[in-house]
Structure formats: C-alpha cells, structure tokens
Image (cartoon, rainbow, N blue to C red):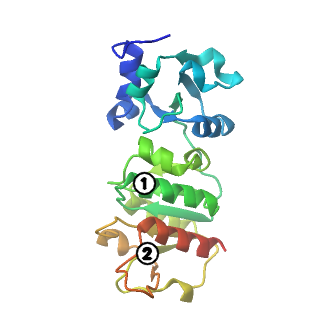
Amino acid sequence: MITSVQNSKVKQWKKLGRRKEREKTGTFFIEGHHLIDEAYKSNWKIVEVIAVKEAGVPEWCHQITEYVSPEVFRHVSYTETPQGIAAVVEMKKMDRSEEKSVLLVDAIQDPGNLGTIIRTADAAGFDAVILGEGTVDPYNNKVIRSTQGSIFHLPVFHINIVHEIPKLKKQGFEVWASALNNAVSFETVSVPEKTALIVGNEGAGIQSEILHLTDSTVHIPIYGKAESLNVSVAAGILMYYIRR
C-alpha cells in the first residue's frame, strides 16, 4: 500500500491534473465507480486503478489496482467527497464513421458547460462532437465528471472548425450556427438529412470567420426577461430539434 504523497506514482497521478501532462502521456485521470464502469464497458484501456481498501474494487481490475491510504487518495482526488476509487485511462483514437448529425463547439471555456454539452449530444444521438480552438480540454476532470460517462460513448475531436466546415459541406451537411443576431427562429427551419450545428463561446458567441461559412443562423426565442440561455441548454434544445 502506498502511504506517502511523495511516492513517484502519486506524483505522476497528480500531474495528470495538467493538460500538458495528459497530452504528453496520452492518459487522463477519472474518479468514481460510475465513470470507471463506463470506461470499462466502452472498451477504453484502463491502465491502472487507484483505490483505498474500503472502496470495493470490481473483480476485473484486481490485477491492475494500486492500493493507497485515505490520505494519499484525498491528495490525488479532485472531488469534495471522494468515493475512494480512481483510474488512469488511455486516450482512445475514435474513428468517424457515417455521420448525419455533428456538433461543433467554438471556444467554450467552462468545463461544466462542455461536459453537459457532450452528455446531451450523447443522449440526443449525435454522431460526433468537434471542439474548435480555445475550447477547454475534454479530459479536464470537471468536464469528465459533467459528462457522466458520455465522454466514452461518442467521438470527441479537437479540429480547426474553419477547416472542417468546407469538408462537412462536401459530405452533404447543412451547417447551422446558433446566434442571436441576423438569425431566424429554429422552429421555422426544416431539418436536412445531414446537419452540423455550431454553438459558441459563453460570452462572445461564435467567431465571425466561422459564422460567414454557415448556411443558416438560428436562435431560440426568449419569452421571459432573461437576456439569453446558457449555452449547454441552448445546445440541448437545438440538438433535440435536429434529432426529433
């Protein structure tokens, strides 16, 4: 059992809190029974499980489990009430197959928003999520927790959106942008067979160079006094409209 926070393995687990280290090693850190179970069921490679004795480790991972003291686990944990079990998971190269609905995310920086968007894209049956420049790392621990395991269910890519839109159009996609200005109500637009939806930064919206490449700009009517909707809520409404 590892009991010291100065242990080399403990230091390495802690380093995975940084994006640079995750990209260098091609691995990331997850916590809790549910996320570990989702990673396992989705055939992602679990490199190592970290647990306290009382956590109740599943049988399939006994041989790759490193037991630690409660103090060490609290040191590497990112949650307020740790479950006592975590894992190091290898990033998986996801293939893009036949796609009919794709979500593009432009510079969304809040981990909770991105995690909720990925979870909703999974629930709505979208085929892929494409993250543009300036978007928070999907392997950030807060993003992963907010996805509730959906990070393991559908392809999530970091791609330059400006370069991606012409490729999508060649594949027969109609590209929609969610914006407030010069936009029509989403309910007035018929949904094509292949749709790529773009949502933008929480404050600045979608960059103008991206907006200029889109086919339609849609907005969600506001009936009350709120100035706007949270981006993850807006994305959810539009994705379910597209997939209805």
The answer to whether 137 is drawn above or below residue 104 in the figure is above
- Distance from Cα at disc 2 to Cα at disc 1: 19 Å
Residue 212 at what x, y percent from top left? Answer: 35, 75
Q: How many numbered dots are placed on residues in this image?
A: 2
Give the residue pinned by disc 2.
178
Point out the tag, 2 or 1, that comes first from the N-terminus: 1
Residue 242 visible, this angle: yes
Residue at (48, 75) in percent of width and height: 176
| Residue drawn at point x = 41 percent, y = 69 percent | 230
According to the picture, the residue beneath numbered tag 1 turns out to be: 112
> Which image quadrant for residue 34?
top right
Near mark 1 (Cα within 10 A), the count class, few <14, some 14-19 or many ≥20, is some
Which image quarter is the C terminus in? bottom right
Residue with the most extreme top position: 1
Q: Which residue of the protein is positioned furthest toward the right in this rendering?
A: 59
Q: Residue at x 50, y 10 (%)?
A: 1
Q: In the figure, is residue 41 to the left or right of 190? A: right
Q: Is residue 192 above or below residue 116?
A: below
Residue 191: image location, x then y, percent: 60, 79
**Where does the image place residue 199, in percent across and percent down from the top left?**
43, 67
Q: Position of residue 238 (x, y in %)?
A: 53, 73
Q: In this image, 191 relative to 218: left or right?
A: right
Q: Is residue 34 above or below residue 56?
A: below
User: Circle 1 sits in a helix, a strand or a loop, which is it?
Assistant: helix
- Front residue of 187/208: it is 187
Q: Amino acid at mark 2?
A: Ser
> Is residue 99 visible to the viewer in this orientation of the structure?
no
- Please state which of residues 26 and 115 is positioned toward the viewer in this rendering: 115
Residue 99, located in which quarter of the rendered image?
Answer: bottom right
Query: In the image, which is nearer the foreground, mark 2 or mark 1?
Result: 1
Element type at mark 2? strand
